[in-house]
């Protein structure tokens, strides 16, 4: 089996080790004998259809987002139709913001998003920074429970995601949220929501990197991408004792900070 991952704008949008998400997907695939090809796609490069199984779009500052939002228009049609067809996407922070309808910066400049997720972001003078712990949306958690073999091996509660957030944009979305904030700020620091999802596309404020210390979510993305391509496959479990330990430590730190 093979998976093809498209890393969007890695030269402009890769904050706090977001790239580690790609490394985790690659590592966890190769341990199962699945080959991985990674393509980096940036400004001026065409996004072709039906090539990629997983898309990743990391975070960046407002300045980079101005450049990226212009170019993203040229990729929007293909990206949205791939998501309609069930392809997997993970976006973090600045990338997430550009997949919503728009982002109005604190200076009053409006950056167009591509409206994959319904909602918008407003720049604020408040910086939402620190460790964040969320309890997963019940639908997502039950899908993860069925498709992530690592969950059976965990001695820890598996209905959480942990990450590190750093943003001043406040996001308001009509899509269901990825989870509810236990500790930290999330989408906007007001309504206890964090992230969003549509079909197999996810947006969140969870840097960290996210996937190395949330192996259940990494396996969920991988198994979804593999099932899209190869039908009803089952991932074999990995020895995730270090990954779950890292997860649990991050949970403890996030709880202490709340
Ligand atoms: N510019 C955005 C904000 O501060 C995104 C930051 C990020 O991607 N870390 O809200």
Image (tube, grey):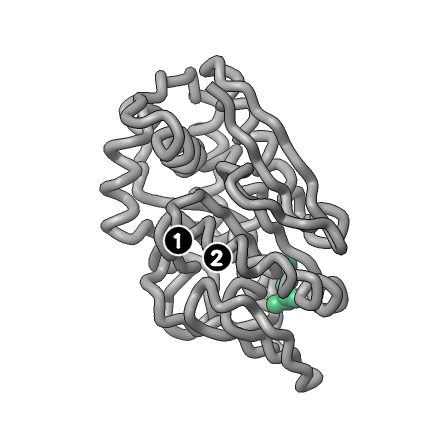
- Position of residue 125 relative to residue 6, above or below, is below
Tell me, yes or no, whether the two marked residues, 2 and 1, touch with CB atoms within 8 Å.
yes
Residue 216 at x, y = what percent? 38, 33
Find numbered disc 1 in the image and state the secondary structure of the residue it sits on: helix
Residue 215 at x, y = what percent? 43, 32
Number of residues whose C-alpha sits closer than 10 Å to that of mark 1, classed few (under 14), some (14–19) or many (20 or more): some
- Specify the farthest residue to the front: 49
**Visible in this render: residue 89?**
yes
Measure the alpha-carbon separation of dots 2 and 1: 6 Å
Query: In what quadrant does ligand 1 lie?
Result: bottom right
Query: In the rendered view of the protein, which quadrant contains the C terminus?
Result: bottom left
Residue 251 at x, y = what percent? 43, 43
Residue at position x 44%, y 51% in the image: 83
The quarter of the displayed image where residue 220 is located: top left
Residue at position x 32%, y 32% in the image: 156
Number of residues whose C-alpha sits closer than 10 Å to that of mark 2, classed few (under 14), some (14–19) or many (20 or more): some
- Position of residue 37 relative to residue 195, above or below, is above
Q: 98 or 53: nearer the eye?
A: 53
Residue underneath mark 2: 80
Residue at position x 57%, y 69% in the image: 113
Left or right of 64, for residue 133: left
Residue underneath mark 1: 84
Disc 1 Cβ-to-ligand 1 distance below 8 Å: no
């Amino acid at each position: 089996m093979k998976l093809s991952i498209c890393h969007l704008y890695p030269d402009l949008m890769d904050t706090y080790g977001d790239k580690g998400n790609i490394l985790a997907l690659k590592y966890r695939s190769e341990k199962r004998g699945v080959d991985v090809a990674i393509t980096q796609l940036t400004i001026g490069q065409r996004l072709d259809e039906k090539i990629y199984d997983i898309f990743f779009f990391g975070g960046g500052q407002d300045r980079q987002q101005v450049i990226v939002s212009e170019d993203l228009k040229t990729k929007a049609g293909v990206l949205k139709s791939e998501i309609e067809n069930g392809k997997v996407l993970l976006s973090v922070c600045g990338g997430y913001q550009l997949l919503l309808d728009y982002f109005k910066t604190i200076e009053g400049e409006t950056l167009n998003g591509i409206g994959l997720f319904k909602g918008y972001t407003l720049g604020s003078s408040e910086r939402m920074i620190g460790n964040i712990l969320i309890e997963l949306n019940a639908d997502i958690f039950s899908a993860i429970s069925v498709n992530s073999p690592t969950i059976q091996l965990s001695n820890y509660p598996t209905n959480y995601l942990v990450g590190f957030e750093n943003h001043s944009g406040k996001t308001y979305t009509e899509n269901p949220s990825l989870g509810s904030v236990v500790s930290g700020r999330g989408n906007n620091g007001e309504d206890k929501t964090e992230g969003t999802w549509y079909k197999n596309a996810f947006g969140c404020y969870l840097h960290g990197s996210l996937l190395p210390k949330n192996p259940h979510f990494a396996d969920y993305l991988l198994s979804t991408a593999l099932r899209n391509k190869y039908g009803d496959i089952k991932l074999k479990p990995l020895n995730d004792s270090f990954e779950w330990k890292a997860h649990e430590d991050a949970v403890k730190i996030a709880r202490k900070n709340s």
